[in-house]
Amino acid sequence: MGFLNNTSVTVDAVLTKKGRELLARGQDEFKITKFALADDEIDYRLWDTSHPNGSNYYGAVIENMPLLESFVDENQIMRFKLISLPKNTAKLPILEVPSPTLTFNGPGVTQAITPNTRNGSDSEAGYSFTLHDATIANLTPVVQKKTIKRKKKRRPFPALSAADIERNPALLQIQKELEDDLVDIAVNVGATTPVFLNEEERKRSITIQGESVNLVSRSVTADTSTNLTVTGLSTGATFNVAVTIKADPSTL
């Protein structure tokens, strides 16, 4: 890690560990489709409205702070993403979860976590769920059933002559129904697990993306606590849930 001199404009682009992994596979998985901006290095408490030189200098300290170089651990950067909100937005998006604290009295207990975003929407991109210690609990995606309508083409109906139609006009409707059959198809829509944390935390942490997850307690020999961090992938809103797993009575 280092600092960039802010006297010149510098673009420092690096691949994260996950990016290098996808590129190394050589299976055409590495495709950049989106980008995001963040202000991790900025301490807005340094905005000085009492500066003696006036409003043009309120941000003088912030503007002269050095910037961090790019580094490759995707879990330690872009923690405070910038978001675009409609003009005249008065309230920032916030997340709602069933409870800010969860306590499990033994192993094998399941709690569904379905967040809701107020003052915004994460329905399209979904949420990121990070369980900090997967040795005491597990995250599993909630598979949701959605019904969609899909047109399924069948073998073309034999061409009708004018004489056929004149003798039986209903043949036209029969032909349409047979050639263009509308069917309902149920599809499963679940979460994906594309990213884990850094090398040291990987053994104990897990991240899942989706609309909803199940948190399942594991067997532990002593009362243990961890955190579940939920983040809206569109709005950037974040909520931390305190998770406590009680000791398994059978191990005492």
Image (cartoon, grey):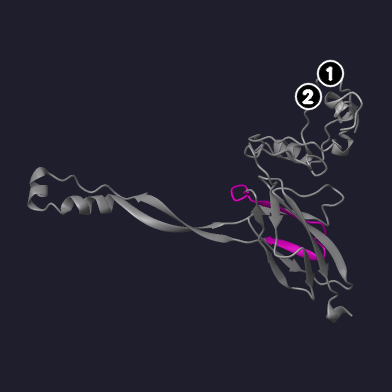
Q: Is residue 138 magenta?
A: yes
Q: Residue at x 67, y 52 (%)?
A: 127
Residue at (78%, 31%) from the top-left corner?
A: 14
Q: Residue pushed farthest top?
A: 8
Give SS at disc 1.
loop
Residue range highlighted in magenta:
121-140
Q: Position of residue 141 (x, y in %)?
A: 65, 59
Q: Position of residue 186 (x, y in %)?
A: 47, 59
Asked where in the image residue 74 lies, by quadrant, the reply is top right
Work out which quarter of the rendered image holds the C terminus and state it.
bottom right
Task: Tell me if 41 is positioned left or right of 194 in this view.
Answer: right
Q: What amino acid type should be assigned to the residue bearing mark 1? A: Ser
Nearest the camera: 139 or 225? 225
Which residue in the protein does label 1 denote?
Answer: 8
Direction from residue 216 to residue 167 in the image, left or right = left
For label 1, count other residues whose C-alpha is less than 10 Å away and answer few (under 14), some (14-19) or many (20+).
Answer: few
Identify the residue shown where x is 76% and y is 36%: 38
Q: Residue at x 83, y 68 (%)?
A: 244
Residue 142 drawn above or below residue 235? below
The answer to whether residue 111 is left or right of residue 168 is right
**Is 122 contained in the magenta span?**
yes
CA distance for labels 2 and 1: 10 Å
Q: How many marks?
A: 2
Looking at numbered disc 2 in the image, what kind of residue is underneath it?
Val
Residue holding disc 2: 11
Q: Is residue 197 above or below residue 59?
A: below
Q: Quadrant of residue 72?
A: top right
The x, y position of residue 222, in whole percent, is 89, 72
Residue 198 seen in render: yes
